[in-house]
Image (cartoon, rainbow, N blue to C red):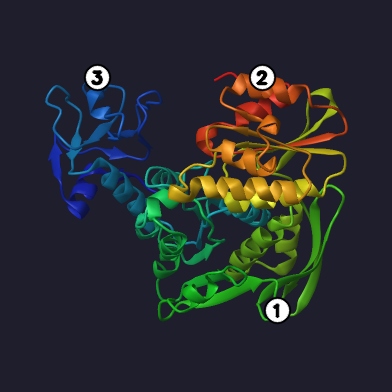
């Protein structure tokens, strides 16, 4: 934190009740397994847990408590509130209000973490950014990022995720971005929204959450670009990026090398800068454009933008290429999956020489059209000439059927991870490239690790 806070300050700003007095704090924790005697403990409540079950035992282990009901057995100072998750965000808001530098917020169906890491690489050359760690991009994770702000930080880069229609708006009310971008909209978490149009509306809250004078970075190549243009708040600046020379920043002359990394001309206000990414896939050109637009909006010079993009060498679990067992090339793209990102992975794999195998875990939260979407990626894998498709999970049957053109004897669908790994192991040699992908629920990183020889895929 930039400065300590107190329970009295929180109660005065947001209401609630103080029990056993107040206390100053400069750290916050929410996990009983990671307690800190100098921290305030927030007792969160989830579907399968309630931290209030343990707070009576925390005397001497933390400075104070945030609870939704009094804990009489505990002598620690307590701030009693109606909802501890809301209180967590309110503490984060006070931390955000202490910060005066630019705040960049990124959301989208695919690639938002890569854009975040690109921005971190750009800003880290001359600045000290505070950046969302891992996947701490929801109502629990974003406040944790804000707690990490310090006097040394001069830019804040926030990744914002959503699983429901009001999530982004809520996160913007806490993070208060000055520059915002929607990387793209694709079918992802459809169950929580109802339709792709509803996803676009929800993601667009990152623009409507901007104050007057803020800047919206618009991906002009996205299907919903016109939708966002028509709903931009008055007084918000727009900066468009894309493949058209009508954009303020655009890419042209894109060339992929034999590994699938892209070189291209990045044109910024009419000046051309040639650069080559060290990330796999042409889709990363679009990610780079969004990152470049965000950086440019905060007055980062073009040369620094180019150097930062060029220097980023990879993001764990996102098209991370490594040497696997039997000399095979393993591309770990296991962090998450939706039909759009799987399509991009198929296009990348199709360009490889030798035998090409896609290993796909079930794509989750796709709603009633989930089977049809799985059939679509299976058909695309067949059309792009992949040599084999191995699927994991019940929805994978639809993808495998489409890939094999309905031939049941050719299906390679597995329900046990060990059986999948064993079957894959027999396919590997130094002429084979395997790309592993799937939603978080499928835990395909265990398959990737096994193919790298790091484990046998244990849970």
Pick whichever of labels 3 and 2 is earlier in the sequence: 3
Which is nearer the N-term, disc 1 or disc 2? 1
| Mark 1 burial class by Cα count in 10 Å: few <14, some 14-19, many 20+ | few
Residue 280 in view in this figure: no
Q: Position of residue 130 (x, y in %)?
A: 53, 50
Residue 340 visible somewhere in the drawing: yes
Please name the residue that numbered disc 2 is placed on: 455
**CB under 8 Å between discs 1 and 3:** no
Asked if labels 2 and 1 touch by Cβ distance under 8 angstroms, the answer is: no
Residue receiving disc 1: 269
Q: Nearer the viewer, residue 317 or 426?
A: 426
Quadrant containing the N terminus in the rendered view = top left
The alpha-carbon separation of the residues under discs 1 and 3 comes to: 60 Å
CA distance separating discs 1 and 2: 49 Å
Res 308 → quadrant: bottom right
Q: Nearer the viewer, residue 140 or 25?
A: 140
Q: Which mark is residue 57?
A: 3
- In the rendered image, residue 122, in percent from the top left (x then y), is placed at 67, 57
């Amino acid at each position: 934190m930039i400065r300590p806070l107190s329970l009295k300050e929180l109660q005065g700003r947001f209401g609630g009740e103080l029990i056993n007095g107040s206390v100053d704090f400069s750290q916050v924790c929410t996990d009983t397994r990671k307690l800190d005697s100098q921290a305030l403990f927030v007792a969160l409540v989830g579907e399968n847990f309630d931290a209030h079950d343990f707070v009576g035992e925390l005397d001497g282990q933390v400075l104070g408590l945030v609870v939704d009901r009094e804990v009489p057995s505990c002598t620690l100072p307590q701030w009693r509130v109606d909802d501890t998750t809301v209180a967590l965000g309110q503490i984060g808001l006070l931390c955000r209000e202490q910060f005066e530098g630019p705040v960049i917020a990124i959301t989208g169906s695919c690639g938002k973490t890569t854009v975040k890491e690109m921005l971190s690489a750009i800003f880290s050359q001359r600045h000290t950014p505070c950046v969302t760690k891992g996947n701490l991009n929801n109502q629990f994770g974003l406040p944790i990022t804000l707690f990490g702000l310090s006097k040394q930080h001069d830019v804040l880069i926030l990744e914002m995720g959503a699983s429901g229609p009001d999530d982004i708006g809520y996160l913007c009310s806490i993070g208060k971005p000055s520059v915002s971008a929607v990387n793209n909209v694709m079918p992802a978490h459809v169950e929580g929204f109802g339709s792709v149009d509803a996803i676009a509306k929800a993601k667009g809250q990152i623009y409507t959450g901007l104050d007057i004078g803020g800047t919206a970075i618009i991906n002009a190549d996205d299907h919903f670009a016109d939708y966002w243009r028509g709903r931009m708040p008055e007084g918000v600046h727009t900066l468009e990026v894309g493949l058209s020379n009508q954009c303020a920043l655009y890419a042209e002359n894109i060339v992929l090398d034999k590994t699938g990394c892209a070189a291209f001309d990045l044109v910024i206000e009419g000046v051309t800068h040639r650069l080559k990414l060290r990330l796999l896939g042409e889709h990363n050109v679009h990610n780079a454009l969004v990152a470049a637009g965000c950086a440019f909006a905060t007055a980062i010079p073009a040369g620094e933008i180019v150097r930062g993009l060029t220097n980023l060498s990879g993001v764990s679990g996102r098209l991370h290429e490594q040497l696997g067992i039997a000399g095979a090339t393993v591309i770990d793209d296991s962090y998450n999956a939706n039909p759009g990102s799987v399509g991009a992975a198929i296009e990348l794999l199709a360009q490889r020489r030798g035998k090409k195998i896609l290993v796909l875990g079930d794509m989750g939260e796709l709603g009633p059209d989930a089977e049809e979407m799985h059939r679509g990626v299976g058909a695309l894998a067949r059309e792009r000439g992949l040599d084999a498709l191995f699927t994991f999970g019940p929805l994978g049957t639809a993808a495998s059927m489409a890939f094999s053109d309905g031939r049941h004897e050719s299906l390679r669908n597995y329900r046990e991870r060990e059986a999948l790994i064993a079957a894959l192991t027999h396919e590997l040699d130094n002429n084979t490239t395997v790309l592993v992908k799937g939603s978080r629920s499928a835990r395909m990183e265990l398959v990737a690790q096994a193919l790298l020889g790091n484990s046998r895929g244990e849970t």
